[in-house]
Every structure is written in structure tokens, then in C-alpha cells.
Image (spheres, rainbow, N blue to C red):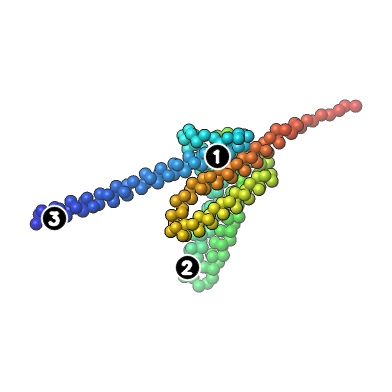
């Protein structure tokens, strides 16, 4: 009787061991993908900066430490730009959910629902100009390596108000939409397997958009350098 119980205990321990190992490996694999994402984002920013400087060859995909730092800086810049509309949307959704779960029949739930809808719309419309400016901010970040340059609006304003930058933003938007629709259709027929290639395709789409934004940055800075300096000259009679 003791022998049978001992074999069952050993068998259960052996059966649990693979599940424990697999469970412990998940955070490690997840961390690796996050680090690779930061490195890829750093390369996109380096490409933006290279194109803005007039370089015709894509930068080498090396010095991963520097790319990782650039990716982390871009993450902080993104948070700084988007924190206000994100908080507005989150708070509005919480208000809406509390209104939906309210049992008050005096119209309080409906009022909270309206407030939630308005808040979500405000947050959404605030995020649109921010999403429009961020590529220029990333470009200036890549040019200097300093996070403060991503908020140098004296440099960014002439860039984001050019036609080339505007059409570059439209091009990137429609390309992202088209790629998203294609992957949704492909993944529907492949039971979700199509999304395995989504990060790789989006990486190259980001590079294509980087060329457009970097080119707009380059032309704007060149035009500013070619302008004659302002002089205050007074002529005496």
C-alpha cells in the first residue's frame, strides 16, 4: 500500500514539473519581446534622424544598446505626450461603467453615460494632434539623443505645418489602416495565425513612414538654413 501511494506522489510531482517550468518561462519570453520592441523602435527613430540629415542609406542595425536607450526614451516621450488624453479616456470609461451599474432610476445613470461619452470624445480628439506631432518629436529626439528635443516646439512647429509632413502623415495613416484590414481578413481565414507576421510587417511600414517624415524634417531645416539672416540696419541722412 505504501509503494502505490509513493508512486502516485512521484507521478504527480513529475506531472507538475513541466507546467511549473513553462509557467516560469513566460515572463522571460515576454521580457525578451519587450526589449526587442524597444530596440526596433530605437532603429525607427535612428532611421528618422538619418533621413532628416540627408543620408541616403539606411543606418546599420547594430549597437543594440544605443537602440535600446533610444527606444526607452521614445517610450517616455510617448507617455508625456499622451498621458492627458489617456487619463481623460480612462476616467470617462470608469464614470460610464459606474453609471451603467447604477440602480438609481432618477436619471443619474444616463447623465453619467453622457458625461462618459463626451469625455471619451474629448480624449480622442485631443489624441489626434498629438499623434500627428509625435513623429516629428521622435525625429528631433533621434537627431540630438536628448528627450528635451522632443518638446522643442520652436523646431517642431515649422516641420509639422509643411505640406510634405501633412501628406506623409496621411500616407502613413492610410497604409496603417490598409495593413490592419488585410491582416484582419488574413487572420480570420487562418484562425489568427496571420497575426504572427504582423509585428514584422508593421516594422517595415514604420520605416516607410519614417522616410516621409524624415524627408519633411530635412527639407524644412534646409530651407531655414538657406534663409538670409534678419538684419536691423538704419540709414542716417
- Name the image quarter holding residue 29: top left
- Left or right of 25? Residue 206 is right
Residue nearer the viewer, 227 or 180: 180
Looking at marks 3 and 1 on the same chain, the residue that comes earlier in the sequence is marked by 3
**Numbered disc in front, either 1 or 2:** 1
**Badge 2: how crowded within 10 Å, few (<14), some, or many (20+)?**
some
| Vertical relation: 202 (above or below) 149 | below
Residue that label 1 marks: 45
Q: Residue at x 21, y 51 (%)?
A: 13
Q: Residue at x 55, y 48 (%)?
A: 82
Residue 33 point in image, percent of width and height: 43, 44
| Element under disc 2 | loop
Residue 125 point in image, percent of width and height: 60, 55
Q: Residue at x 68, y 41 (%)?
A: 158
Residue that label 2 marks: 102
What is the CA distance from the residue labelled 1 to the residue labelled 2? 47 Å
What is the CA distance from the residue labelled 3 to the residue labelled 1? 61 Å
Looking at marks 1 and 2 on the same chain, the residue that comes earlier in the sequence is marked by 1
| Element under disc 1 | helix
Residue nearer the viewer, 74 or 189: 189
Residue 137 visible (yes or no): no
| Vertical relation: 96 (above or below) 87 | below
Residue that label 3 marks: 5
- Name the image quarter holding residue 59: top right
**Badge 3: how crowded within 10 Å, few (<14), some, or many (20+)?**
few
Residue 20 point in image, percent of width and height: 28, 49
Amino acid at each position: 500500500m505504501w509503494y502505490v501511494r509513493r508512486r502516485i506522489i512521484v507521478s504527480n510531482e513529475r506531472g507538475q514539473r513541466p507546467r511549473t517550468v513553462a509557467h516560469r518561462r513566460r515572463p522571460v519570453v515576454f521580457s525578451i519581446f519587450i526589449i526587442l520592441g524597444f530596440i526596433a523602435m530605437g532603429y525607427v527613430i535612428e532611421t528618422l534622424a538619418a533621413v532628416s540629415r540627408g543620408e541616403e542609406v539606411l543606418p546599420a542595425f547594430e549597437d543594440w544598446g544605443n537602440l535600446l536607450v533610444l527606444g526607452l526614451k521614445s517610450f517616455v516621450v510617448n507617455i508625456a505626450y499622451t498621458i492627458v488624453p489617456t487619463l481623460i479616456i480612462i476616467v470617462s470609461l470608469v464614470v460610464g461603467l459606474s453609471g451603467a451599474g447604477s440602480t438609481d432610476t432618477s436619471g443619474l445613470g444616463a447623465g453619467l453615460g453622457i458625461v462618459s461619452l463626451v469625455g471619451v470624445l474629448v480624449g480622442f480628439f485631443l489624441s489626434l494632434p498629438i499623434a500627428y506631432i509625435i513623429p516629428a518629436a521622435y525625429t528631433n529626439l533621434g537627431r540630438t539623443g536628448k528627450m528635451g528635443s522632443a518638446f522643442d516646439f520652436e523646431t517642431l512647429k515649422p516641420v509639422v505645418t509643411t505640406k510634405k509632413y501633412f501628406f506623409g502623415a496621411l500616407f502613413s495613416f492610410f497604409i496603417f489602416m490598409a495593413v490592419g484590414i488585410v491582416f484582419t481578413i488574413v487572420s480570420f481565414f487562418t484562425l489568427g495565425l496571420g497575426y504572427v507576421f504582423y509585428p514584422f510587417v508593421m516594422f517595415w511600414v514604420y520605416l516607410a513612414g519614417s522616410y516621409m517624415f524624415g524627408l519633411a524634417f530635412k527639407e524644412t531645416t534646409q530651407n531655414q538654413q538657406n534663409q538670409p539672416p534678419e538684419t536691423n540696419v538704419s540709414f542716417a541722412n
